[in-house]
C-alpha cells in the first residue's frame, strides 16, 4: 500500500492506505480524527468539510493520496488548545447545534465564508450553506451563530 | 433557584465536545481486532431467492459470509412488533415473520440477503460483489391502496389481500346521523407523502462478544438502548439481560428512525460470537434510504359536517396506511392510536369516527417519524377546516375560533379516547394572528399582486398527545411494553451529583435541561451535575426518547428522585441539628430549622451520608442515592398555532416562505433556548414535507429518490428566521407541569404551509410536496378552468 504524508492541524502525519481511500476515511481511520463526519455518499451533506491549503473542501470528494503534502485543518484544529475559536463560541452561545453531527462541517464551511466575506448578509449566509445539511436546527440558529461569529471576528453585524 | 435553574437560557453542557470534534458517535468507536460487515441487499422489491452462493467470497478471503440459512440454523427469531392492533371484529392483526436475513424471499429493495464480514470495509464491499444470488423476480405491490385490491401481488403468503389490520375508533352511528342533519359537508382526499427521516448520522452498530465472561456488547445508534436490549435479547437472539449490554453513545439525530430494533443490530451481535471478533457496520446514506424505516404514507378520505352557523357536527375519516414489507417495532400503533386519537384536533366536534386499513407492500417498512401519526392527523383536520371555511365563505381563523374547545371546558374528553388536561387554544390563535399582523394581510397581498406575485396566509392549529404513556392505558390498547421512565440521582460525598436517566439525548440537550432541574431543586452549581444516559450497564432501566416524552416522563422520574434525596437529607439534617424533621426546611441548597439561624448546606448533608459519624443509623441507611420509576397519569397535550405566509411566482410556481409564526403551549419550560431550537427544527421538517421531501417508488418498487441527489432535503435558503413564542399553560398531572416540545413544529407546520399555498392560488387540491412544478400546474389548470 502506498504511503501518504500531509500536515494536519500543524502536525506532520503520514500513513499507509489503499489508493482508493477517500481523504475523509484516512482522517477518521488512519489518523483517528473522528470529528470529521460522513453523512452521505454523494457529496451533498457537507459533514466532512475540512480546509485544504486554505480552501474549504468536502473531504469525501478526494482521495487521500491527492492530499500528499497538503496543509489540512480539521475541526480538531480550530480551537487554540482549550481556547475556543470565536466561531465555536458563537455556535455554543446561539444554540447553533443539537445532535452535533453536522456541526464540524458547518463550522469549517462557515469559517470559509467568513474568510472571503467578513460581513455576510443573512441571504449570503443561507446561500453559502447550500452544501451543508442539518436536520435538527432548521438552520435558524446556525445562521444566527454565523452572524454572531462575523461580529465577534471583526465584521460588523 | 441558581442562575442555571428552571427557566434559564443555559448554554448546553454537551456542546464543547461537539464543537471541537470530540463527540463520540458509534462510527467513531473502534474495538480491538474488529472486523467489518457489509450487508448484501436485494436489488429487487419482490423476488424468490433461488440460491445464494457464498463460495467465491469465502475463497477470496471473507472472514465469514452469513445468510438466511445460517440465521435459521442458529435458531434466531424474527424481529418483533411492539404493538398489537385488533381488527374491527376483535381478531388480532396479521404479523408475518420479519427475518433478520431473508431466507427464501426478499420483500423490498434493501432486504438483507447476506452479511459479508472481512478485515476492512472496502474488502467486505468487494467480497459482497462475489456473492452469487439467483433471484426469481416477482411482481411487486407498491401503492397501499392498490395492494388491498383483489389480484394484487401478495407480499406475504400468510396475509391474505395484504391486509395487516382493519381497525376503527369512535362510534359510527352518531356520526352518520349528524351528517344526515348537516347544512354543509366538506370532503377532502389527501395523500400524506412518504418521508425518509434522514438523521444526519447514518445508523451504525458494533457487536462484541467476550468469551471469558460470555457477555455481549452492542454499540448502536439508538434512541432507546434498553428497549433494544429487551427486544433483541429476549425475542430475537435469546440472550438474557445480564449478559447483554447495549450502549448508545452520542447519537446524531433520530427523529424516530432510531427507536426501532433493526436487523443489523441483531446480526452484528450474533456474528461477533460466530467469528470471535468484534463486528462493525456503518450504513451508507444510500443504504439508509432502503433500510431505515420511513414515515407517513397515508391515503385518506375525510368528511366534515357543519351546521348552518359553521359549527362542526361530525367528522369521519377513512385511511389506508402503508406498513411496507414488514412490521417495524412500533409501526402498527402509528396510524391507529397515535393518529386517529388526534382527529378531534382542538375542536369540540361532538362525533368522530375513523377507520384505518393497514397494508403490506414491497417497500421499506414504515414506522414513527417525528410526530408519528399526529402530523398526519393534524394535516387532515387543518386542511378540511380551511376547505370548509373557503366553501362556506368564512374566515379560516374565525371558523377555527368558533369551534375551538374553550379553556373553561378543561379537562375535555374527546370522542376519540383522549382527555385533554389543559390549554388555551383561543389565546394561541389570537397571539399568533397578532404577531403575523393578520389584519394587515390584505394590504400585503395587494402589494404582492402589484409585483405580479400571489400571496397567501395559512393557519394550522395543532394538538398532540405526548409523554407516552400511562402503561395500563397503553397495555389495554395493545402495547407490549410499559412506558414509564427511570431516573437515578447519585449524590456523591462532596455534594456533586450524577444523574442516570433512561431518557436518551440525540440532540435534545438533556445533559443541560436535566442538570437544570437538579440545580433548581438541590441548589448545586450546574458544573457539579453530570447527566449519564445511553448505556444499559449504567442506567437502572429506560424506555428511551421518542414521542416528546423525555421531560414529561424522564424529567418527572428525575424530579421524584430529587424529592427522595431531599426527604432523606431532611432526616439527616434534623438529626444533626437536633430538631424535629417537620421543622426542617430545604431552600436554596440549605436545610434550616424554621425560626432559628441553624442551617446546614446540602454538601454537609451529603458528606454526612457517606461519613456517617453523626447519623440517624436507627432510622436510615448511609448513602444518598435515590431512584424513581415514573409512570405518567395521562398523555400530555402540547398545542399551538402556526401561521405561514407565502409568496408564489405564478410564472414558475416557486413558493417562498415569507414569514412563519408559531405560538406553542408546552407547559412549563426548563430551558427556553433549547425549546426554541426544537421548534425551529420541527418547523423545518414540516416545511420539508410540505414543499420538497418525497419518497417516490416506481411500479417495480424501486425507490427513485434514494440519495441526496434525488431526495430533496430542506436547505438554509428555503426559509426565513422563524418567529416563535410560547403560551404557557402548565400540564395539570405531572410534577413539573411540562408537556414536551420535540415534535410540535413538525406536526403543525405542513398544514400551515399548504393552507397558505391553497389560499394564494385559490386551488384546494394541492398535494404534498407542493413542488414548484405542482404549484405551477395547479395555477395553470385553475386558470384554464376559469377561462373555459
Image (spheres, coloured by chain):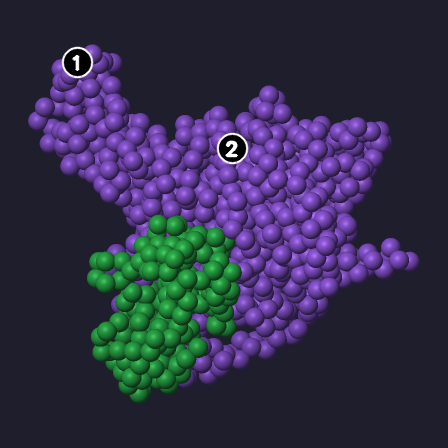
* Residue toward you, B707 or A45: A45
Give the Cα separation between the discs numbered 1 and 2. Answer: 41 Å
- Residue labelled with disc 1: B596
User: Color of chain B here?
Assistant: purple
* Location of residue A84 in the rendering, given as x and y in whole percent from the top left corner: 27, 58
On the image, which quarter does residue B290 sit in? bottom right
Q: Is residue B504 above or below residue A127?
A: above
Q: Which residue is mark 2?
A: B727
For disc 2, the neighbor class at 10 Å (few under 14, some 14 to 19, many from 20) is some
Dot placed on the residue nearer the N-terminal end, 1 or 2 = 1
Q: Judge from the rendering whether residue A133 lies leftward or rightward of residue B752; answer left or right.
A: left
Write the residue at 70% across / 64% down.
B652
Is A9 above or below relative to B250?
Answer: below
Please report, as a chain letter, where disc 2 is located: B
Q: Colour of chain A?
A: green
Give the quadrant of residue B249: bottom left
Q: Residue at coordinates 60% horizontally, 52% vertically from top-left?
A: B658
Residue farthest to the bottom, as pictured: A2
Residue B404 to residue B147: above or below: above
Q: Secondary structure at mark 2?
A: loop
Q: Secondary structure at mark 1?
A: loop
**Residue B224 visible from this viewpoint:** no
The image shows residue B156, relative to residue B466, as above or below, that is below
Instruction: Give a yes or no on whether discs 1 and 2 share a subunit.
Output: yes
The quadrant the N terminus of chain B occupies is top left
Residue at the extreme right: B788
Q: Is residue A96 left or right of residue B145?
A: left
Q: Quadrant of the C terminus of chain B?
A: bottom right
Is residue B671 visible in this depiction of the protein? yes
Tell me where residue B117 appears, x and y as whole percent. 40, 73
Amino acid at each position: 500500500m502506498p504511503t501518504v504524508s500531509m500536515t494536519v492541524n500543524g502536525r506532520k502525519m503520514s500513513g499507509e492506505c489503499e489508493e482508493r481511500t477517500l481523504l475523509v476515511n484516512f482522517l477518521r481511520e488512519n489518523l483517528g480524527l473522528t470529528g470529521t463526519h460522513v453523512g452521505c455518499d454523494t457529496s451533498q451533506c457537507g459533514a466532512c468539510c475540512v480546509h485544504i491549503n486554505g480552501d474549504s473542501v468536502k473531504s469525501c470528494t478526494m482521495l487521500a493520496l491527492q492530499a500528499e503534502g497538503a496543509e489540512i485543518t480539521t475541526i480538531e484544529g480550530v480551537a487554540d488548545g482549550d481556547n475556543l475559536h470565536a466561531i465555536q463560541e458563537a455556535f455554543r452561545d446561539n444554540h447553533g447545534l443539537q445532535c452535533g453531527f453536522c456541526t464540524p462541517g458547518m463550522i469549517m464551511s462557515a469559517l470559509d465564508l467568513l474568510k472571503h466575506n467578513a460581513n455576510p448578509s443573512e441571504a449570503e449566509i443561507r446561500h453559502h450553506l447550500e452544501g451543508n445539511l442539518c436536520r435538527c436546527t432548521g438552520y435558524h440558529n446556525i445562521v444566527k451563530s454565523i452572524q454572531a461569529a462575523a461580529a465577534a471576528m471583526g465584521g460588523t453585524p | 433557584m441558581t442562575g442555571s435553574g428552571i427557566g434559564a437560557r443555559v448554554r448546553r453542557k454537551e456542546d464543547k465536545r461537539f464543537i471541537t470534534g470530540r463527540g463520540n458517535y458509534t462510527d467513531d468507536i473502534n474495538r480491538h481486532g474488529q472486523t467489518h460487515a457489509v450487508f448484501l441487499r436485494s436489488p429487487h422489491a419482490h423476488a424468490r431467492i433461488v440460491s445464494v452462493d457464498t463460495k467465491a467470497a469465502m475463497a477470496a478471503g471473507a472472514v465469514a459470509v452469513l445468510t438466511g440459512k445460517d440465521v435459521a440454523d442458529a435458531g434466531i427469531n424474527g424481529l418483533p412488533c411492539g404493538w398489537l392492533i385488533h381488527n374491527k371484529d376483535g381478531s388480532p392483526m396479521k404479523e408475518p415473520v420479519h427475518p433478520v436475513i431473508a431466507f427464501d424471499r426478499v420483500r423490498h429493495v434493501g432486504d438483507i440477503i447476506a452479511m459479508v464480514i472481512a478485515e476492512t470495509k472496502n474488502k467486505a464491499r468487494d467480497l459482497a460483489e462475489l456473492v452469487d444470488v439467483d433471484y426469481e423476480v416477482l411482481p411487486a405491490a407498491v401503492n397501499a391502496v392498490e395492494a388491498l385490491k383483489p389480484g394484487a401481488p401478495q407480499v406475504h403468503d400468510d396475509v391474505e389481500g395484504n391486509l395487516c389490520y382493519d381497525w376503527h375508533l369512535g362510534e359510527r352511528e352518531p356520526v352518520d346521523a349528524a351528517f344526515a342533519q348537516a347544512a354543509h359537508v366538506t370532503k377532502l382526499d389527501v395523500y400524506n407523502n412518504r418521508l425518509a427521516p434522514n438523521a444526519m448520522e447514518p445508523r451504525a452498530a458494533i457487536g462484541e462478544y467476550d468469551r471469558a465472561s460470555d457477555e455481549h456488547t452492542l454499540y448502536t445508534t439508538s434512541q432507546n438502548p434498553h428497549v433494544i436490549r429487551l427486544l433483541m435479547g429476549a425475542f430475537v437472539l435469546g440472550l438474557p439481560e445480564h449478559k447483554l449490554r447495549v450502549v448508545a453513545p452520542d447519537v446524531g439525530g433520530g427523529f424516530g428512525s432510531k427507536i426501532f430494533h433493526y436487523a443489523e443490530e441483531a446480526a452484528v451481535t450474533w456474528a461477533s460470537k460466530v467469528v470471535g471478533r468484534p463486528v462493525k457496520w456503518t450504513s451508507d446514506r444510500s443504504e439508509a434510504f432502503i433500510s431505515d424505516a420511513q414515515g407517513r404514507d397515508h391515503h385518506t378520505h375525510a368528511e366534515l359536517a357543519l351546521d348552518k352557523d359553521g359549527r362542526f357536527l361530525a367528522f369521519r375519516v377513512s385511511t389506508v396506511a402503508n406498513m411496507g414489507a414488514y412490521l417495524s417495532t412500533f409501526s402498527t400503533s402509528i396510524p391507529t392510536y397515535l393518529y386517529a386519537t388526534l382527529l378531534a384536533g382542538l375542536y369540540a366536534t361532538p362525533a368522530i369516527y375513523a377507520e384505518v386499513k393497514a397494508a403490506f407492500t414491497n417497500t421499506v417498512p414504515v414506522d414513527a417519524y417525528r410526530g408519528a401519526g399526529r402530523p398526519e392527523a393534524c394535516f387532515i383536520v387543518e386542511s378540511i377546516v380551511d376547505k370548509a371555511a373557503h366553501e362556506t365563505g368564512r374566515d379560516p381563523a374565525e371558523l377555527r375560533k368558533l369551534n375551538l374547545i374553550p379553556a373553561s371546558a378543561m379537562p375535555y374528553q374527546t370522542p376519540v379516547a383522549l382527555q385533554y388536561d389543559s390549554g388555551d387554544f383561543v389565546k394561541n390563535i389570537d397571539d399568533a394572528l397578532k404577531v403575523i399582523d393578520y389584519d394587515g394581510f390584505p394590504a400585503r397581498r395587494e402589494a404582492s399582486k402589484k409585483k405580479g406575485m400571489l400571496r397567501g396566509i395559512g393557519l394550522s392549529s395543532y394538538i398532540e398527545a405526548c409523554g407516552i404513556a400511562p402503561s395500563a392505558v397503553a397495555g389495554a390498547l395493545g402495547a407490549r411494553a410499559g412506558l414509564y421512565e427511570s431516573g437515578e440521582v447519585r449524590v456523591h460525598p462532596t455534594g456533586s451529583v450524577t444523574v442516570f436517566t433512561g431518557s436518551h439525548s440525540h440532540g435534545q440537550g438533556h445533559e443541560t435541561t436535566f442538570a437544570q432541574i437538579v440545580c433548581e431543586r438541590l441548589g448545586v452549581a450546574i458544573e457539579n451535575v453530570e447527566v449519564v444516559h445511553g448505556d444499559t450497564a449504567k442506567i437502572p432501566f429506560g424506555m428511551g426518547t421518542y414521542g416528546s416524552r423525555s421531560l414529561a416522563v424522564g424529567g418527572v422520574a428525575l424530579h421524584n428522585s430529587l424529592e427522595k434525596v431531599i426527604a432523606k437529607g431532611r432526616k439527616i439534617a434534623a438529626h444533626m441539628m437536633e430538631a424535629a424533621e417537620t421543622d426542617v426546611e430545604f431552600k436554596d441548597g440549605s436545610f434550616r430549622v424554621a425560626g432559628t439561624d441553624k442551617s446546614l448546606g446540602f454538601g454537609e448533608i451529603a458528606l454526612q451520608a457517606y461519613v456517617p459519624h453523626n447519623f440517624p443509623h436507627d432510622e436510615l441507611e448511609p448513602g444518598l442515592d435515590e431512584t424513581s420509576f415514573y409512570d405518567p397519569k395521562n398523555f400530555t397535550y402540547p398545542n399551538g398555532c402556526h401561521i405561514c405566509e407565502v409568496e408564489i411566482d405564478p410564472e414558475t410556481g416557486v413558493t417562498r416562505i415569507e414569514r412563519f409564526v408559531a405560538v406553542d403551549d408546552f407547559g412549563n419550560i426548563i430551558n427556553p433556548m433549547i425549546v426554541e431550537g426544537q421548534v425551529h427544527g420541527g418547523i423545518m421538517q414540516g416545511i420539508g414535507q410540505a414543499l420538497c421531501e418525497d419518497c417516490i417508488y416506481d411500479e417495480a418498487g424501486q425507490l427513485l429518490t434514494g440519495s441526496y441527489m434525488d431526495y430533496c432535503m430542506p436547505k438554509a435558503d428555503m426559509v426565513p428566521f422563524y418567529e416563535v413564542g410560547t403560551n404557557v399553560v402548565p400540564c395539570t398531572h405531572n410534577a413539573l407541569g411540562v408537556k414536551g416540545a420535540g415534535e410540535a413544529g413538525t406536526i403543525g407546520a405542513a398544514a400551515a404551509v399548504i393552507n397558505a399555498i391553497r389560499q394564494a392560488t385559490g386551488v384546494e387540491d394541492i398535494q404534498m410536496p407542493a413542488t414548484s412544478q405542482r404549484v405551477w400546474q395547479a395555477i395553470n389548470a385553475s386558470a384554464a378552468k376559469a377561462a373555459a
